[in-house]
Image: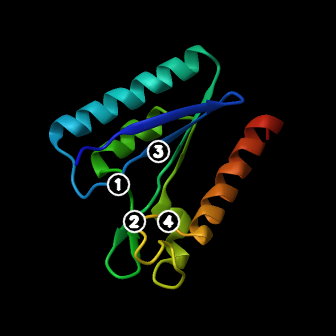
Amino acid sequence: MGGRLALESVAGFVWNTHATEDTLSDYQLALTAALIKRMYAFCEKNNIRLIILDIPRVRGQRGIQSSFDKELVPVIASNSDAYFVSDALLADYSGVAELHVPHGHRHISEFTHTLLGVAVAKKIQQFVTGQ
């Protein structure tokens, strides 16, 4: 099963989602890095903010882990205007709250959607207000 990147632009902001997989090949890692760099270059050229939100993968019974391989983190951090790491945002809730839908084929829960959405909305508000 291959991963894919989806890109959507609305009101001058770009959202990036990365399909969850257990492992990526060297080719997939290199391709993902190249696509992120290309998206960021396009966004900068067109005065668009690139926000990358890490949607957590399931780890164990109730745990989570980043959907991005560690090798991609420096590329993402230096080629985006904001990078939200799910491990950091959701750490306090891992093992306590339901972060993925039970029997939901790795879909995040409504609770997780809310937490991630609020974090991103606050960042967009900062960009809009200049704070």
Q: Are marks 2 and 1 in contact (CB under 8 Å)?
A: yes
Q: Residue 128 is drawn in which quadrant?
A: top right
- For mark 3, what is the residue? 17
Please, what secondary structure does the residue beneath circle 3 have?
A: strand
Q: Which mark is residue 106?
A: 2
**Kind of residue indicated by mark 4:** Ile
Kindly identify which residue carries mark 4: 108
Measured in 3D between alpha carbons, the distance from the residue under mark 1 to the one under mark 4, in whole angstroms, is 11 Å
**Cα–Cα gap, marks 4 and 3:** 13 Å
Q: Quick one: which residue is furthest to the bottom in this view?
A: 96
Q: x and y percent of residue 79 in the render?
A: 46, 32
Q: Earlier in the sequence, mark 2 or mark 1?
A: 1
Which mark is on residue 20? 1
Closer mark to the observer between disc 2 and disc 3:
2
**Observer-nearest of 96 and 79:** 96
Give the side of residue 108 with respect to residue 122, left or right.
Answer: left
Residue furthest left as drawn: 26
Q: CA distance from mark 2 to mark 1?
A: 8 Å
Up the image or down, 65 lies above or below 55; here it is below
Q: Residues within 10 Å of mark 1 (few under 14, many from 20)?
A: many
